[in-house]
Image (tube, rainbow, N blue to C red):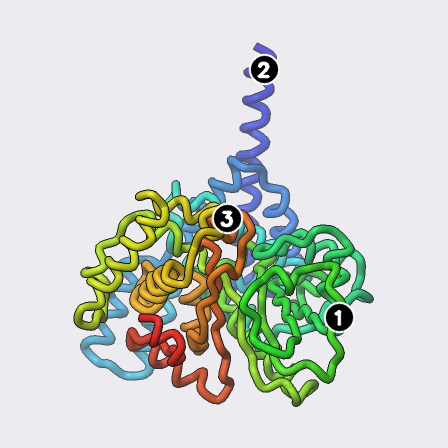
Amino acid sequence: MLDELREAAARQRANHHLRSLVFGCKRLLSERGETNSMAIARQLVERIDALPEGPLDDFFDYLSVQLSPDPQRVLQAAQDYVELPNAQRLIALTQVAEPPRQELLRRLNRTPHGTATLVRMRRALLQRLPKKPEWMALESDLLHLFSSWFNPGFLQMRRVDWNSPARLLEKIIHHEAVHEIDGWDDLRRRLQPDRRCFAFFHPQLPDEPLIFVEVALLPDMPPAIAPLIDKASPPLLPERFRVAAFYSISNCEPGLRNVSLGNFLIKSVAEQLQRELPRIKTFCTLSPIPGLAAWLLREPDFATLPNLRRHAATDFEAARQHLLALCDGDLAALQRAATHERMDKESTAALLTLCAAYLLHLSPTPEGDPVARFHLDNGARLERLNAHGNMSAKGLKQSFGVMVNYLYDLDKVEASHEKFKQGEVARSRAVHTVM
């Protein structure tokens, strides 16, 4: 009985909290609310931050249903515009078609902590979205607004070094998503003069890195990751710097998923390094291929690959049969280091042929490797495939140890981007001859 009373009291408090929040939203959107909008918005931000799980779901329901456009007003405005398509009627249509929740979100964002609250709110929304597809319009509005609020023109790029605040360095260790940082010694090596780390920050979130990229300054384009993250390796002298290799890029904030930040960060870093170190002429990546192993293990039908040249499917099947013979009929053996120790030149060539097939033919499609799609859509060129590039357990599991260099030719990124949009992957002769 006591537990039931407690649950009832908790529900009553939650309902009161939600009613108070909804009332505040209506005040903020009202004409009268404009006068005291900052004070009202500040109170709303505090209440949203304090929402427990259940009322937060109810609040998402309110935003999705009650603050959507009025269908009848939208229909009437659309009919008016069809009858007389002038500027005034187009403006009227766009005004009634915009969900009122967008204006609510804008006003919340004007408060000192509003941006952080809305980012956390979207993080929670994205976690729930698979089970709540009816919230998709709310997610679309948030993504639309965030794409403007987190425009690179508003962001600040900063170099992270060993003298950066300890709290920031801890976040770099925590958020590194590609190559785990093994403690402070490892981080210190990654911040030596021949290694660089750059991050984007937002003025409203000055101490929170949104995304960061790690760069190795080298004499040559790197074929493997182990030497780059070897914390015992000696730093190179600046006069040997000829290549800037981006070897890791990590998003720090799940609430900014699908907001384009990484492409602008890479290009901004390349331009800054070019100014600072004019000897560096080559900007490239050393990238994983996280979808390669899963694709090959599904036994794809090579004949269905898009943009296939004549006899290519036969060549790809011959490469697969060669690897199957090496692996005693189970390609999953390529996820073990011992298998790679038995590989000869022909076996390595077969693996790279299938990797090239995956990257060249599937990358322009939604089924393509996510890392490849990111760099190629960003205007990079598929430059070189590297067998045994990452022999860690993760590298073997994801891509049978293969890594790839994408080249950022700053004078050609726009042309390469347009080529990719047309379904063609810009690639070097070295990759072309692998096919």
Q: Which mark is residue 3?
A: 2
Q: Nearer the viewer, mark 1 or mark 2?
A: 1
**Sequence-wise, which precedes: disc 3 or disc 1?**
1
Sort mark 1 into few (<14), some (14-19) or many (20+) by Cα contacts within 10 Å: some
- Residue at mark 3 to residue at mark 1: CA–CA distance: 29 Å
Residue at image x 42%, y 74%?
A: 382
Q: Nearer the viewer, mark 2 or mark 3?
A: 3
Q: Which mark is residue 27?
A: none
Nearest to the observer: residue 397 or residue 415: 397
**Sequence-wise, which precedes: disc 1 or disc 2?**
2
The image shows residue 339 at horizontal and vertical percentages of 45, 48
Q: Amino acid at mark 2?
A: Asp
The image shows residue 64 at horizontal and vertical percentages of 41, 50
Q: Which mark is residue 235?
A: 1
- Residue at mark 2 to residue at mark 3: CA–CA distance: 57 Å
Instruction: State the residue position of label 3.
Output: 337
Q: Quadrant of the N terminus?
A: top right
Quarter of the image where one finds residue 305? bottom left
Determine whether 176 is above or below 333 in the image.
Answer: below
- Local SS, label 1: loop
The image shows residue 293 at horizontal and vertical percentages of 39, 52
Nearest to the observer: residue 163 or residue 244: 244
